[in-house]
Amino acid sequence: MGEHRVVIDLLKQGYHVAMAVDPQCPFDLVAVDKEGKVRLIDVKSMSYRKKNKKKINRVLKPYQKTLNVELMEIPND
């Protein structure tokens, strides 16, 4: 559901958006602007530790970094 929220936001900003169908894909979304600039996006829901309610820090894997994947964290509702 979080990915769909990001898709809607990107569409409103004028991007063309495609969703990955491969479960092992290093990104969830491909967004392309009107000039052809491509963004690879990995969507993560914000998570918090049960014990102390601190936010869990999400990081990209090395392969994602080589692809210049962007990490987008969205709040859980």
Image (cartoon, grey):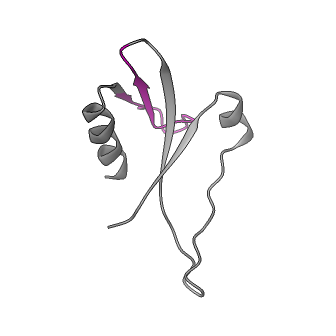
**Observer-nearest residue: 63 or 69?**
69
* Place of residue 7 in the rendered image (x, y in percent of width and height, measured from the top left): 32, 38
Is residue 50 positioned above or below 31 on the image?
A: below
Q: Residue at x 31, y 52 (%)?
A: 1
Q: In which quarter of the image is the C terminus?
A: bottom left
Locate residue 41, reporting x and y percent: 50, 36
Taking the spot 55% from the left edge, 82% from the top edge, the residue there is 53
Dividing the picture into quadrants, the one containing residue 68 is: top right
User: Which is nearer the eye, 75 or 25?
Assistant: 75
Name the residue furthest right: 62
Check if residue 40 falls in the magenta segment.
no
Q: Is residue 20 magenta?
A: yes
Locate residue 5 relative to residue 59 in the image: left or right. Answer: left
Relative to 17, is 28 above or below? below
Q: Residue at x 46, y 38 (%)?
A: 28
Residue 38, position as x, y percentages in the image: 49, 20
- What is the span of residues highlighted in magenta in the rendered image? 18-34
**Secondary structure that dominates the magenta span:** loop
The quarter of the displayed image where residue 4 is located: top left
Residue found farthest to the top: 35
Task: Please state if 51 lies on the left or on the right of 32 as rendered.
Answer: right
Q: How many labels does the image show?
A: 0
Give the x, y percent position of residue 35. 41, 12
Question: Where 26 falls versus 73 (above or below)?
Answer: above
Q: Against 22, is 45 above or below?
A: below
